Amino acid sequence: MMSPHIVRMAQKRNPKTLKPSLIVHGGAWNIPDEAVDDCRRGVRRALEIGWEVLMGDGEAIDAVEAAIVSLEDDPTFDAGIGSHLNLDGRVQLDAIMMDGATLKTGAVAAVERVRNPIRLARAVLEKSEHMMLVASGAEKFAAAHGINLVNPDELILERERTAWRRCLEDSHAAEHHLSHEMGTVGAVAIDTGGHMIAATSTGGTCCKFPGRVGDSPLIGCGCYADAEAGGVSCTGHGEGIMKIVMAKMATDLLHDQRVLVHHRKKAGPQSLAQAVADACVRKLAHRAHTTGGLILLDSDGLPAAAFNTPRMAYGFVEPEGTFKIAP
Ligand code: ASP
């Protein structure tokens, strides 16, 4: 017999009445004025691409993949082409995609020869019995499933090589990065059938130790999706986000909001989704003493974003269909 909760979910998820939802981000960081337009353009393009899929009754998984591919292909962001270089001067990419219905996940880490790691994460999600593959094993899986392996140099921009050289000569500093200090990307979508998908893709941090993996591809840290609670994608200082398992923290709070009651009374008529996003960023600051942000959709598709960096690049589709873009 179905539990009352599942019955309620099924009623909410009537495909005839369900509106799709989409939220994307291009990282929480100190985005300087001169990079704002590029960030807004990239976020808008990703939203348009994903939204077109959802409005055509397409699936959340296709919408999220298409939105993230456009962000990976945009050199404004630290994902796919244009990613930061590690200490060895190489690009090592991480990505994850999670299915909110089954909790099955596909994650890849430290891949160097895949132009769009989100496509590989999706292949792991759909075609592997495993949840996470790394480095040469992930690339072997890519080749076996029709994903082209590219020359790693194709992912490196001269801009990043220059920043990397400056970091080595001096010490690692955001100022060396010509307005491109961070910029992990992510997306969460719910389609007209009620299917929820969340995903994150990143080049990680500049000058990271070879083999370093941050929060982004780790289930519950940089991404989580549970259709009974919500879908989340995080960005920011990976080592801090891992300490508080931020994406899972958000879905736990969405699922059981009792600990937020006191805060919500003070915050006034704020949505639960927004209260949860704010609570996660507060925890990141107070418990891990660091910066970052997150986007989420609750199980009804209500969006929220929060960050404690000067700016965050993100956008979502408002209930009446208009695009809200930040910064
Ligand atoms: N969270 C990413 C990492 O630590 C970086 C970012 O979001 O900008 O790899």
Image (tube, rainbow, N blue to C red):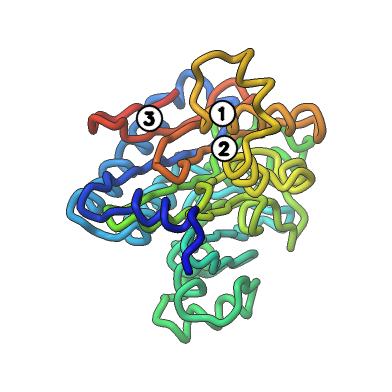
Task: Indicate the position of residue 245 as horizontal and vertical percent values.
Answer: 72, 48
Percent of width and height locating residue 228: 51, 52
Amino acid of disc 1: Ala
Compared to residue 216, the image places residue 119 above or below, namely below
- Residues 85 and 30: in front is 30
| Residue depth check, mark 3 versus mark 2: number of the one nearer the observer | 2
Q: Please, what is the three-letter code of the amino acid marked with disc 3? A: Arg
Reading the image, the residue beneath label 2 is 294
The residue most toward the bottom is 144
CA gap between label 3 and label 1 equals 17 Å
Q: Secondary structure at mark 1?
A: strand
Question: Are circles 2 and 1 on residues that touch, CB within 8 Å?
Answer: yes
Task: Residue 79 in the image: state x and y as whole percent.
Answer: 51, 50
Of 113 and 135, the residue lying toward us: 135
Rendered residue at 70%/39% (across/down): 237
Image point (27%, 44%), residue name = 19
Q: Is residue 42 visible?
A: yes
